[in-house]
Structure formats: C-alpha cells, structure tokens
Amino acid sequence: MTTYETIIGLEVHAQLRTQSKMFCGCSADYAAAAPNTHVCPVCMALPGALPVINHTAVEKTILAGLALNCTICEHAVFARKNYHYADLPKGYQISQYELPFCRDGWIEVEVENKPGFSEKPGLSKRIGITRAHLEEDTGKLVHGGSEAGDTRLSQGRGSYTLVDLNRAGVPLLEIVTEPDIRSPEEARAYLVKLQQILRYLGVSSADMERGAMRCEANVSVRPVGQEKFGTKVEVKNLNSFKSVKLALEYEVARQIAALERGERVVQVTMGWDEERGRTVVQRTKESSDDYRYFPEPDLPPLVVDRAWVDEIRSRLVELPDAKIARYVNELSLDPRDAQLLAMDRGVAEYFEATLATLRNQVSRRNLVSSAMGDAKIAANWITGELFRLMNAAGAGIEAVKVAPAALAELLGLVAAGQVNQNGAKRALGAMFVTGQPADQVIRELGLAQVSDADALAQAVTDALAKFPAEVARYRGGEEKIFGWLLGQVMRETKGKGNPAVVRELLEKSLRG
C-alpha cells in the first residue's frame, strides 16, 4: 500500500474588536441584538451608499501582522470579491487580495505526538503565513421550517431561510497560511497558538464556538516522495479545535481511500457534518479567477506610513512564547507551569501581580525567601488550588473574586507561620466565594496556626495515649508509621498545629 503525505493550508477569519463596522458607523456589537437592528444603508447595500474605512480596524490588522512576524506593506488596496449568496447584500465582499496589509509572516508551534503539555519541550516548527488581510463579514442565514416545529410560518408552508444583516460589515481579519501543515494535530496546534496571540493582543475574542474565529482548511494528499501537490479540497464549518482535528482526519482518510480505489480526487468544497462525523460535498470549489477581483472603486488605495507602523509596534505586548521563556529562565519555573500561566493573558497578569505583591509582603515581614522561591510558591497556588476552584465553578480568571493582592496576603501569612497549608486552602476556598480578605477569613473560621510548644506538647501526649499499640510498633523499629502518628497529632490540633513544631515534639516524645 502506498504511503501518503498530508498537505494542509488554513484560512482563519477572526472578527476584530471594534465599536463600529468596517465601512459604516453601525455598532459591531451585534451578539445580543434583535435581527436586522444594527444596519444602515451602507451595510444593507442600498443604492448610492458609500463605504468609509474603519481606522481602528486597520490599526488592529497591522498590530496582528506585526505579532505574526509579517512584512507590513507600504501600499494596500481594497478589492471587490464577487460572488452571489443570500447573506451577502452587495453581491460582492469588500476584501483584499493582491495588495494586503500584511504578508510573508510565520508562527512557530510545538509539534508533539500528543496534544497538551509534556515535561520535555516538543520540536518547534515554523508555519508560514502567506498574508493577513482585512475584509468585511457577511450576514447570517437562519434556516427553519414547519417540519422543524417552527411556528413563525403558517402550517404547510414548508422550510424557509431568514437573513440577519447585523453581522454584515463587521471587520474581519483573514489569515492565510502556506501549505506547511502536515497533520491534523499540527493544524490544531497552529490554531491554538493563533487564538492565543489574537487574544493577547486584544484584537479579537477569537471565540470559535461563538463564530468570532472561523476556520477553513485546504487539504490534499500525495504519495511520499512526490513533489507535486495532490488535488486540494476545502473543508468548511469548522467551529472548534475538536471539529478541525476530526474533520481533517476524516478528509485525509477519505482522499487516501479514494486514491487507493483508483479514483480521482475532485476539487470541491466540503462541509463538516458534526452529527454524522463526516465531510459532505457543498459545491464545486471556486478559484480566485471565479471571484473576479478588481480594485474597489469607492475606496482609495492606502499608503501605510512607516512612522505609524512604528507607533503601532510600540503597543505590542509580551507574547506567550517570550513570556514562557522568561518564566523559565528568570523565575526558574517548571516549563509546564510556565505554559499554564502564559496560556491566558489574564492569568499571566494575575500571576505577575500576585508575585509582585508577595515579594513586598515577604520584604515587609523580613521573612527569609528568594525571588525564585516566591515565583514557585505563587505559581503552585495559582495552577493548583486556584485553578481547581475555578474549574469547579466554571469561572475564568476575570470572574475570580480573590484579587492578586489578597492571594499574596494569604501566601504571606503562610510564610509567616500564621496559617498552615491546609488552613490556607480552606481560607482560599472561602475567599473565592465571598471575596473577603485573608486575615478576616482566617479569624472568622478560626484557622490561625498554633505554634505554642506547650499546647502542642499536650496534643502530642493526648494522641499517643490513644494509640499505644502504634507507638510500640514505631519504637520497635517500624519507622514508616511515624507519618500516620503525625497525622493523628494534627487531628488533635484540628489541623491548626504548626507542622514543623509538631514534628519536632513528636520525634522527641517517641524517643523518650
């Protein structure tokens, strides 16, 4: 059987976060609006209406291009992309083709056999970006009918399609890769990294489930060793990382099976049917010639000033890869923890704010610590206990009531010996619900750590008196039972005993 190589190129459309649409003043915040309420003569394509370029959308496109290592073109032209579909009011889309804002970029992704994190870094692969250009979004079609139980039409009228133009004209950033991707897992890794970058920049929510980031894939296969690409098939309707991976796996297998049967792969547009877990033919695949691109006559060519690009470049934030490297190299964090913290910009900012305040707490209390030690403590609590609470509540970092300063205060109290680890976990759980400060929660719940030697000595005596057989076993050489005895003493203190003091007193008592 012939061995085949997979060739994948991705086209990603990300809605830009702007107040108004791309070529008119209508609000771009349409998600909760009633149908066809965020519309005007421009985005409804009424005769005589003229477009005006959204300055903020252009800036955000250039910002994204810089982050994607693109060359920013000095001249850019909007073009008419002609095709007829019910959700495209003008009968063409204002887009860019030959002269986009950004071209020749790249993203590096970590290539592994399995998704997720590993203790050892994976191989890095560079995926080329052909261009990143700006265009307008289409409207949205809503399909329904009497057979689906819809009562908006009279019974017996059959199925129908409604058109909502609220989305028509929303700024859309299209990012097109080179055919550099060689597996569905690489495609998924690219999309995860791209979403992360767009969110870090704040240019798009990049939420695939809500349609703010949409993906189309061009897929072909060829025998290993063959230079010429196979016939590519476009796959649409990919609205999650999972669907991208599953659709590409299915389509690759479908094409290979067809070739093995001696059939020819036909260039078509396929849709991903998530319910049936398969790709289905939608229409014959168009080429660029079919769109009859020509310069938009109602919009002038744009000259991109170098000083403007430099000013936009100054707004670039530290991106995930650089942040991970800094966490590992300067803060000595474990690479896996560094990745977890840098995955989301909000989490990274929460961690850095917690760390900064924790260092002040340690310095103010004259506690023995180190910058690297403080970073590991903050990282462990955030990726451990705080993430556990967030996952249980289904909450993102923006909804957490525990401010970074409050978490740092709690960790400072642990370092000062005023509350032990178990007590601090209980306190954080209460703080997560109420948003109250650490000292108040510890006081109200009676979680303050007991370090008084006399009180703890009595707890040791009481615990050992309850378990004479276990004490005899320890003194007879069964040293592994020490941990169990230590737990019994901590139970006597209701978990509030200072573990170090309890251990010292218990060892002394058992020796006697």
Image (cartoon, rainbow, N blue to C red):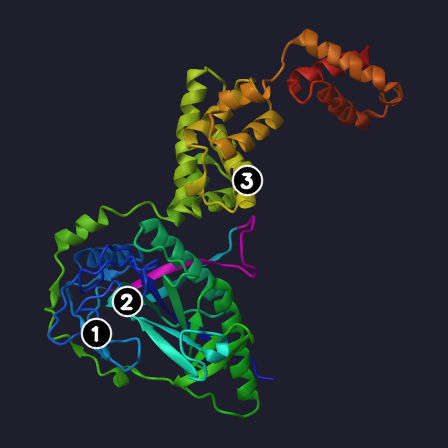
Q: Amino acid at mark 2?
A: Asn
The residue beneath circle 1 is 98
Horizontal and vertical percent for residue 61?
25, 59
Task: Read off the residue under disc 3.
Answer: 389
Q: Quadrant of residue 418?
A: top right
Tell me the number on the disc at residue 36. Answer: 2
Residue ID at (18%, 48%)? 311
Tell which circle, 2 or 3, labels the residue nearer the N-terminal end: 2
Q: The residue under label 1 is which amino acid type?
A: Glu
**What's the residue type where badge 3 is placed?**
Leu
Mark nearer the N terminus (1 vs 2): 2
Q: Are the residues flagged by discs 2 and 3 in contact, CB closer than 8 Å?
A: no
Compute the Cα span from label 2 to label 3.
41 Å
**45, above or below 197, in the image:** below
**x and y percentages locating residue 205 in the rendered image:** 36, 55
Res 373 visible: yes
Say which of 490 and 7 sits in front.
Answer: 490
State the residue at coordinates (17%, 79%). Answer: 294
What quarter of the picture does the N terminus occupy? Answer: bottom right
Q: Is disc 2 surrounded by few (<14), some (14 to 19) or many (20+) residues within 10 Å?
A: some
